[in-house]
Image (tube, rainbow, N blue to C red):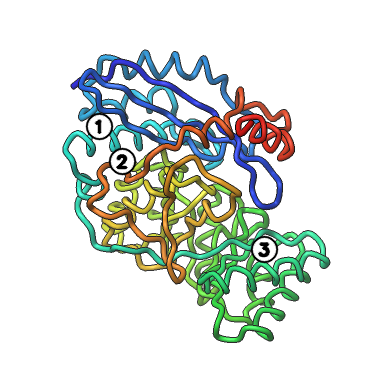
Amino acid sequence: MKIVDLKLTVVGVPRHTGFVNKHVIIELFTDEGVTGFGEMSDFSHLPRYAPDVNDLANVLKSILVGKNPFDISLINKELLGNFPEAMYYYEKGNFIRSGVDAALYDLCSKSLNISVADMIGGRNHEKIKVCFPIFRHRFMEEVEENIEVVRKRLSQGFDTFRLYVGKNVDADEAFLAGVKSEFGSKVKIKSLDFSHLLDWKQALQATKRLSKYDFELVESPAFANDFDGLHHFRMRTDYPVSEHVWSFRQQYEMIKRDSVDIFNVSPVFIGGITSAKKAAETAAVAGKSVLIGTTQELSIGTAAMAHLGSTLTNLNYTSDPTGPELYVGDIVKEGVKYEDGYLIVPDRSKVGLGMEIDWEKVEKYKVDDLSWGEVSVHQLQDRTAQTKA
């Protein structure tokens, strides 16, 4: 079997907040008629630059066309040469490699009539505990809005939340106090996520201040790539410390300095299922746990995470992929499922990633490019009305 062509399609899907996030759907076509799909997720994540899609398609064609899709390691090596490991996890080369890698696994698994999870090692889990994000408070007025998010999502079965902190610690504390007062033990706070916003000393002060409230762990409590700072923080707190993995060099430095307890592993941030699996296994060798991170993917990207997570033996903490719940729509016929705060791994009977593209939805959300020119919800609504007409 050979790859004979590929296609990239950009979609802009609004979040419930109204902000439109852009994603790239990749299709890999073969001479045997099997097609693989992947998702380059959330190109609207910072920083605010993006590749030209036509140029990107031509580069990927030069790498992929003519290749046997089962040569996943060889293809990943060539992709890495063109889209190097990131110095920071928001860099887009990893996003690109992640989408291609997922499409390769989807394609190969379909040709074997098995699921991706079975192809990459088999299942240890049929469902993965996940948390819903509470985005960072800037103003005190946002506290009640976020408590309302907790009310709504708790009614839908999400009982665990991840709180982005550090911009307005007064508001962070007010939120935690409000949650404790209203919900008590019904709601759990998985983590305080500082997202490299503060240096380790400031993050430690904030953590001590908020420690009167229950939370499980602390994430990214130092500037990016400050491995010594992470170690200093970890040695001064009783909470487990988590950090994203966006390159193997960075993971090596964190292991060398014993900087973390938990590696936050996400295909999109490290460049695909292949690299994420390797990072999780590296963590296991070092005696560390992992959780599955997120950039807020659609269902194809989230399904890739579910398949990956199902195979891991050191997935010991609540994970993050609830992206599809943040959007008003999706581009598949039947999206990933959540039950009682768990992400359900697609059933073995669904080959590949287990997702089927809905081309009417793709047409509804399709946009021209990845530019940061604003795509409004109203524009997408107008297009939907025209399509129905």
Spot occupied by residue 145 in the image (x, y as percentages of width and height): 75, 66
Q: Name the image quarter holding residue 21.
A: top right
In this view, the residue farthest toward the front is: 389
Which label number is shown at residue 274? 2
Q: Secondary structure at mark 1?
A: helix
Between disc 2 and disc 3, whose residue precedes? 3
- Using the image, determine if residue 326 lies above or below residue 181: above
Q: Which residue is mark 3?
A: 165
* Spatial separation of the CA atoms under disc 1 and disc 3: 38 Å
Badge 3 amino acid: Val
- Which residue occupies 51% across, 72% down? 157
Q: Is residue 221 left or right of residue 285?
A: right
Image height check: is 297 above or below 365?
below
Q: Quadrant of residue 357?
A: top left
Helix, strand or loop at label 3? It is loop
The x and y percentages for residue 15 are 64, 48
